[in-house]
Image (cartoon, helix red, strand yellow):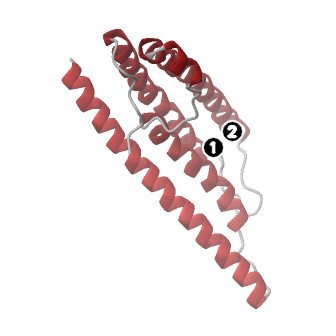
Amino acid sequence: MTSGLSELEARVNVFARRLALAGLTGLVAIALMTIADVLGRWLFASPIDGVTDASKLFVAIVVAAFFPGALAERHHISIQFLGNALGPRAKAWLNAFGSFVTMVFFAALAWEFVVYTEDLYESGETTWLLGWPVAPWWTITTLFMVLCIPVQLLVLISDVRTAARGTDAPQKTA
């Protein structure tokens, strides 16, 4: 079981890193679109129509693409002084509790994204200038947020397993 769980965690980490890389690529694309738009305004007094509309849709997806990787690799803020003061076993259980709270938070957040996306489909909202439907873009964003739940569940299982064994808490991976 331990080997299988470790292998699953490794696969999830690879997937999450690839998703973050796609997000980074999207971030670069947004930056390039913005630069081209600014240069067009400055040099030719002619902005690129729709850059703002497209950027608003892309940014949500790009940001959401980073969350699964951040969770899988434990790139989050944590306060260690209490765990350090209480010892390694307490620290491991506090990490497990923190992982549980994080999972509950992301489950609630993902649920709110689902509700919001459903509202967008019902309202038929479109971007102002391009007239693109907004809901399909938020569906992708919502999917990335929903993916955070199983990723964080694996982190929680790993942290509980570590705490139950009485070993030091896992550190974030490089």
User: SS class of the residue under badge 1?
Assistant: helix
Residue at 59%, 72% in the rendered image:
32
Pick whichever of labels 2 and 1 is earlier in the sequence: 2
| Residue that numbered label 1 is attached to | 135
Q: Quadrant of the C terminus?
A: top left
Q: Residue lying at the far bottom in this picture: please name it.
A: 43
Q: Nearer the viewer, residue 172 or 155?
A: 172
Q: Amino acid at mark 1?
A: Ala
Which residue is found at the position 64% from the left and 36% from the top? Answer: 117
Is 95 situated above or below 6? above
With respect to residue 135, does 2 lie above or below?
above
> Residue 60, position in %: x, y?
62, 48
Q: Does residue 107 appear in this view?
A: no
Q: Nearer the viewer, residue 26 or 14?
A: 14
Name the image quarter holding residue 85: top right
Relative placement, left or right, of 115 versus 95 is: right
Circle 2 residue = 120
In this picture, residue 2 sits left or right of residue 76: left
- x%, y% of residue 157? 38, 18
Q: Mark 2 touching mark 1, by CB under 8 A?
A: yes
Q: Is residue 16 visible?
A: yes
Residue pictured at 38% horizontal, 13% vertical: 163
Q: Quadrant of the N terminus?
A: top left
